[in-house]
Image (cartoon, grey):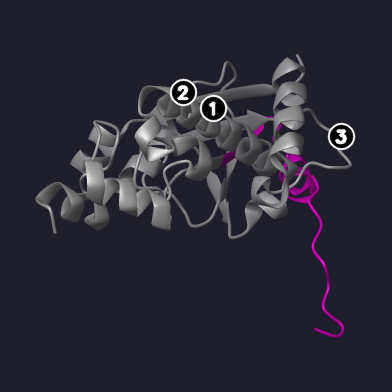
Amino acid sequence: MKGAVTQICSLAHEDKLRARGLRFIAGVDEAGRGPLAGPVVAAAVILPAGYSHPVLNDSKKLTSRKRDALFAELTADAAILWSVAVVEPGEIDRINILRATHEGMRRAVAGLTMVPEHVLIDGLPVRPFPIEQTALVGGDGLSFSIAAASVIAKVTRDRLMLALDTQFPIYEFAKHKGYGTAAHLAALRKYGPCPHHRRSFLPVRQAELGL
């Protein structure tokens, strides 16, 4: 649209909080809310003040090769604190995907070696949350901290799905990462669900019932 302003991923939101005297600000994001199989993975990241990166952005806007390179770079940097939490399908089915996602975010923040003073969360507010939060819709494309969490969560989950693919090759998890593609749905109808499918999701439940 003419005159529209393109928002760029930066530390602008983190810097506003630092101007209030806060030092440790974590970005939080998740990967895997929508798939029919596999866990939901949340990540929390605290970047050092002044951090910048020419490529870091919302993981969905990056190629898998760039995500892998960023993952290696972020997790090897001693100045960057990070943590991941994995919520398995059984727990997702017990408490529902939204609550499982929120629980994963809380666990990821709790896993950091430094307790943050504030968290920036991608999307809508998470209630309850033990730390003061700011929710940013589209935050993984606005905040470097959230973008870093987005990359770490996405790469972690993709690697878990690749491992599941070796155990259950009939579903071809390596290709679709558990999302409801036509090929995945066809395999579900043919073979039924495996232990890593989310039985609270309608297509999986239907396949299990032979519908």
Classed neighbour count for the residue bearing mark 3: other residues with Cα under 10 Å, few (<14), some (14–19), many (≥20): few
Q: Amino acid at mark 1?
A: Arg
Which residues are drawn in magenta? 1-28
On residue 31, the disc is none
Residue lying at 56% horizontally and 34% vertically, measured from the top left: 153
**On the image, numbered disc 2 is attached to which residue?**
163
Q: Is residue 75 left or right of residue 8?
A: left
Q: Is residue 34 visible?
A: no
Residue 211's place in the image compared with 15, above or below, is: below
Q: Residue at x 87, y 83 (%)?
A: 3
Q: Residue, x 62% and y 24% (percent of image)?
A: 82
- Dot 1: what SS? helix
Q: Position of residue 138 (x, y in %)?
A: 63, 58
Read off the residue under disc 1.
159
The residue pinned by badge 3 equals 50
Q: Residues within 10 Å of mark 1 (few under 14, many from 20)?
A: few
Dots 2, 1 in contact, CB < 8 A:
yes
